[in-house]
Image (tube, helix red, strand yellow):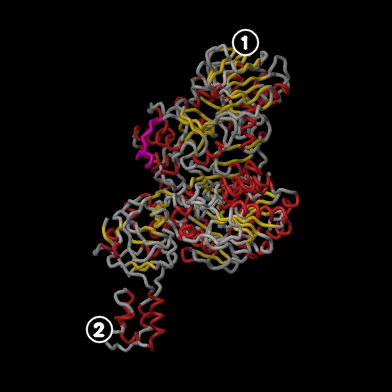
Amino acid sequence: MARRTSIYELYEYLPKTNCGQCGLSCMGFAGYLLSRDVRPEDCPPLCTDAFEEARQQLGALLGDGVKDPLTGLIVDADRCIGCGICVSVCPVHAANNREVSLGKGPRADDTVVLRIVDGCVQLSSRELCNRAIPSAPPCKACADNCPTDAMELV
Amino acid sequence: MREGAEGVKVRPDVGGQHTGKTGPYGLRNALAGSQTEYHSHVCAGCSCLCDDISLYLEGGRIVRSLNLCRIGVTRLLTITAEKRLPETPFPSLRESVRRALDIFTERGPVVCIGADSLDQAGIVASAELARSLRGVWVPWAFEGMSRFFEHAVRCGWATALLDEIRDRADIVVFWCVDPLVTHHRHLSRYSVFARGRFTERGAADRIVIGVGRDRTPIEPLCGYFFVVGPEKEADFIGAVAASTGARDTLGYKDLPMLLRALDRATYIAVFVDPERLTDAGLAALFEWSLSINRRGEKRMILFPLWTAGANAVGFAQASVDMFGTAWGRGFSEDLEAALRKRTWEALADQVGCVLMIESGPAGPTRRSLPDCLEDKPVVVLTPFKEPPVCRACVVIPTALPGVETEGMFFRADGLPLHAGRVECCTGKGYPRSEDVLDQMLLEVAL
Amino acid sequence: MSEARKKIVLRNGRVFDPVQGWRGEVRDIYIADGRISEPFRDPDEVIDTGLRAVMAGGIEPCCHLGTPWASLWRAGAGFSPIDRIGEIYARMGYVHVHQPLMTLLTAGAVRYAMSRIPFVDTSAWVSLDLRDLGTTVRAQRKAEFVESARALLELTGGIGVFLPFPHLKHRQRHYAQKNISAKTLFQFISSLTDADIVPIALWALPGVLDNDRDSLCLFHLSCAGAALGSEGDFERACALLAVGGSVDLGLSTGMPCMAVTAAERCSPGDLSVDMGMGAPIRFGHFDPSFNREMCRNGWRLLCLWEERWHLSLSPAGIGGCEPDAFPQAVSWLLEGHGRPAMVEEGLGGRVFGLYEVASLTRAEPARCLGLADRGHLEIGARADVSVYEVAAGMQTRDLSRAMGNCWCLIKDGVVVRDKGAFTGLKPPRRFRSKMVETRGADPRQSEVALNASLRCEHLKYAAGLDGATEVT
């Protein structure tokens, strides 16, 4: 699934003055926004009234999902419908849990990367995720197959 | 136990990304002190009938669920809210039943709608009541159901268990139906992403095709998506079925590629919502299926995906067993004649009041009465906390089947599953729909 | 006192019981606590049969009733609904109906359907899925194969094990290495000795008789009517029966009927359901005029019948679905006049007696299903007794009426019919299963259920949900 936004789209809403108050150029700041390492509030000019609308737009693009530091997964709980596609396509599950790869939901005591809790996907044993392995190619199976763009990997 | 954020103890075997927020059921998102757990519970929110649900209860209330999609969660929310149902002017069940029967008697005949969301015992009870009232008994999907099953009996029908589709389908078509709207876990459990015996790469071993009146949420998952209006539907199917290197693409640039894919396929699964197809379109689909299956080299199955009640198949089963047809019954000549016209308008002309039964999907996919029945007095049996979207004269609160009461339901492919009861305090005092219907039946007999 | 515990005496019956060698001697039958009993002095009820024919309750070895969607097709095709089917069997003096195939997934549907058939006990064979068990066959892991089969029996409540095809042939070429030939399978099956598993039932689809005769003896061939399509098939069937092979067979009465088969191709009007059996189960129409030789061969087989043959007759007919015409067929067995040409050509003038009919419809079906307490009237057997008003010199029309409306039927000691009419009493009904060693949460059960979309917990049958179950 396509990402909801891009560095260029975020950059359009920034002051584009390269004032350096945040310690970065505006394009650099846009990159850190995208990876959720900073928030719009971390840019002092953005906090002024003149950029209120831009701030709101940035908030809408970025959502309020919390990034998991180990895997970089952000889940938009409002978009997630609990379809379980991410659970069934996860390559870790495919390799280790035949029931889950067949489409059945993981049991409560199964050790899995992702599971559906209260209708929304959550990380369970995040250390098993391929993305937690520094040398592994970044896996995006879950986010790429999410039909509602509820998952983002940064 | 380990300490999570905000001092909430989290069980290590479930883990979970703790958000600090309250869970969707309005209570703290806690597993600590969970007194009761239900595993492999069956969800009766839609005809997927997922049987891998875990429910955690604390103090008799559901506080957490695993493997439950948004449809199932929304359905559970109806019974976990403090105030469940709107107030009714009739304080006791007996009085509500009497008032309902007064309506049926004074303003009959009655049309009984919606039993296809009940468990099997409730379906049979509703049929008996409709019969005793000499009314008409239909599912939500009766228009589509009657057309589909009439075609099935007349032309023949090739179908399959969902497991076989998962194992063998190399082309999956969603025709005027979008599981991302109505059956959230369908794609991951059965039709697209699950890795089957002979589709070991899951979605990579399948081509997904969508056909709809408009673009729907499933479009991004489809290899090809076609927007086909009702007037073009039969021609479109005819062109696909002919598949002779169609010179006329009917304006669809992807049509030749679709035909090539169909040509290479060995097993084509077409999921369809008969309610949304034209009669000509449905007939054309059956003809296409027959033309493929009579050769025996490849197989095409037609699979109706009913979107109204979780137990539409159970309704069809009970209706066939009791009355010989799958789409209900009119208990007088006039009503049976109206039923044969297969439109709500024809029924509305003959009936004077409505018995509406709810227990299926809540939220956005919750059904409402057809417009032509809106002006009639309505008696509603419902477990939902939000009032029904109609001018109801009598609202009788009921227990939620498959959670507060147990019952048998049929999965979309005809397999029965028993949905057990969860010992939650919210269920106390609410009668089963079956009991309300039986009481009405008793009163009628008296 | 409950009806089932009554002491009943049936007096003055001409009793036919092949298991005990009774050929119509006038005897009294004593029933107590739902079982055939030693004589006693204080009966609660005495039924004077007036020298009418008495035999054990009939047993249907092959009737397809519980397949998903079958009831829709039956209703659309104008055939009897499922509750009426029970009444038809009871009228014919039958007490047990067996569904030859159910799978792990469809077991719940089959049991649900069977539980709604009134009057009769029911049972079903569970189908082995070679797609899952093929590895054990190719690797000759007999113990594992047997344990898997036992796990399936435990999970589904099957009364035996069934194979729809004697081979495994994948449609996809890249799975060809997983194919299993009939020869390999027969070799493997011949080495199995577990009494819970063997003999395995095999669906006698067209072509099955082409296989090696000695190998086919390892199986019980079910619904063999459709396998007798040619002269060669007929001869092979005779040879098989002559060396002790076990077969059940439905007869054609020459009328179009509904038939169940497994076939890739569909015809207009067919219901075709993929249930994981290698080919879809097809409910279609059977027209005898296009299958004259097949229909006649069934009757020819009976012409050559010998008492030592393990041959059972299925009232559900050559199609395996519809018992309505069976009384007519029985009347043609019992009376040489008035037979249609096809039947006369087949039977060649041979006339059967009630002893032979009892063997074909009681003793042998009980044997092939493993119902040791049925099909005969030995002391200790279930009190399933049918009484028919059949007299010497009756014409076929009267015989047909008599065999289709038994004068008296007692099932499990409950008098269901008396003097030609239903009494209104409902006998206990059970789903009969095979006794296998129970192992609780057996990991083998989880293994055989792994490929199913449902969890193992929901595949395991639970007694009580769909009527009482009883292990044999």
The location of residue C169, given as percent across then percent down, is 45, 41
Q: Which residue is mark 2?
A: A23
Question: Could you say where residue C146 lies in the image, as x and y percent from the top left?
Answer: 38, 33
Please tell me whether residue C442 belongs to the stretch shown in magenta. Answer: yes
Whether residue B155 sits left or right of residue C453 in the image: it is right
Give the residue at x 73% y 22%. C398
User: Is residue C48 placed above or below C296 in the rendered structure?
Assistant: above
Q: Amino acid at mark 2?
A: Gly
Residue B62 placement: quadrant: bottom left
* Start-end of magenta stretch: C436-446
Q: Residue at x 60, y 22 (%)?
A: C302
Q: Secondary structure at mark 2?
A: loop
Which of these two is toward me, C373 or B378? B378
Q: Position of residue B435 (x, y in %)?
A: 57, 47
Residue C221 image point, x, y percent: 51, 29
Q: In the rendered structure, the residue with mark 1 lies on which chain?
A: C
Q: Nearer the viewer, residue B114 or B406?
A: B406
Residue at 35%, 53% in the rendered image: B34
Whether residue C74 appears in magenta in the rendering, the answer is no
Q: Between A119 and A1, which is closer to the camera in this rendering? A: A119
Q: In which quadrant is the N terminus of chain C drawn? A: top right
Marks 1 and 2, how far apart in space?
A: 111 Å
Decide: is C465 above or below C404: below
Which amino acid type is marked by label 1?
Answer: Val
B115 w.r.t. C414: above or below: below
Residue A71 in which image quadrant:
bottom left
Q: Is residue C344 left or right of residue B39?
A: right
Outermost right residue: B334
Crowdedness near tag 1: few (<14), some (14–19) or many (≥20) residues, C-alpha within 10 Å: some
- The rendered magenta stretch, by its main secondary structure, is classed as loop
Q: Say which mark, if any, is on residue C26.
A: 1
User: Quarter of the image holding residue C135?
Assistant: top left
